[in-house]
Amino acid sequence: MNRSILLIALSLCALSAHATTITIESAGVGSGAISTAIADRDAWILSNFGPSAVSDLLVDFESYSLGAYYSLNTAAGTFSLLPGSSPGNSSLSDGTKTNQFSILDAGDSPFKGRFDTTPGGSQWLDSNDTTKVKLATTESIIYFFINDVNDCGGTLTIRTKDGTTSTVFAPTGQNGNLYFVGIQSSGPIGAIQWLNTSDNDGWGIDDIGTVAWAATPEPAAMPIGLAGLLAIPLIRKYKSRTRQVAE
């Protein structure tokens, strides 16, 4: 192959490849750790995207019907089960023991360590102890809160479509633990997978979002606004002289 053609081919491959980073931060245990998880999210956004970046919530699961699902369309993408997923253990799991994930709230959840993280909310998406859950998404930036990870002997792996993986959760987690997870890619993430080695060790996920940028004044509008501010004292001075002449 001609050297120049080879270099072009390699350059195109490099451009098409997505560089993906998965960040996982432990926030603590229980609902009292939610404020720490929110602080972790805000710090991640600031350090990676700058001071004009803000969190943009995509889905908090509050508007969905409680119960079990095979597939669920959301503003963040479509949740489904991966081929080869196993249902919750028929004798050990506290879930429905069907190969489905669930929308739960504190009132009907059979799991002690999973909870809602939305201020004023009550619902979340739960793995129902199934072992392979997937989110197909077109977003290039995704964050979420996840709880009750690895507390029953399992190991949870997060994997994106390009093969990037992370298992940075406590290997023997405490019941009710809470984590912030942020994923960023140079292109569409494509898919996020939650892969568990145990059919008796699930998790709950809530408040999935992305990043937006705060609006700034249009440059063309700034001189106009500045001119208006400078004109105010001149107008006041003119009105004062007019009143003096009239008197």
Image (cartoon, helix red, strand yellow):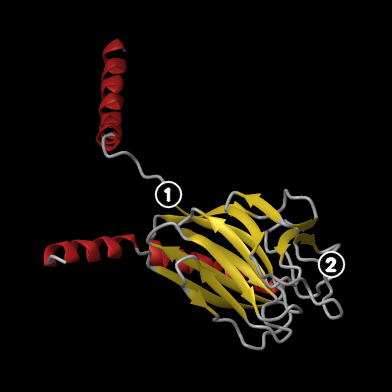
* Nearest to viewer (mark 1 / mark 2): 2
Q: x, y (%) of residue 220? A: 26, 35
Q: x, y (%) of residue 19? A: 37, 67
Q: Do callouts 1 and 2 mark residues in contact (Cβ within 8 Å)?
A: no
Q: Residue at x 61, y 53 (%)?
A: 78
Q: Which residue is mark 1?
A: 214
In the picture provided, is 202 more to the left or to the right than 230?
right
Q: Quadrant of the N terminus?
A: bottom left
In the picture provided, is 123 more to the left or to the right than 159?
right
Circle 2 Cα neighbour tier, 10 Å, few/some/many (<14 / 14–19 / ≥20): some
Q: x, y (%) of residue 47? A: 40, 68
Q: Amino acid at mark 1?
A: Ala
Q: Is residue 98 visible?
A: yes
Q: Against 76, is 33 above or below?
A: below
For numbered disc 2, what is the local secondary structure?
Answer: loop
Q: Amino acid at mark 2?
A: Thr
Nearest the viewer among 24 and 163 is 163
For numbered disc 1, what is the local secondary structure?
Answer: loop
Q: Which residue is mark 2?
A: 96
Nearest the viewer among 105 and 30 is 105
Specify the quadrant of the image occupied by residue 209: bottom right
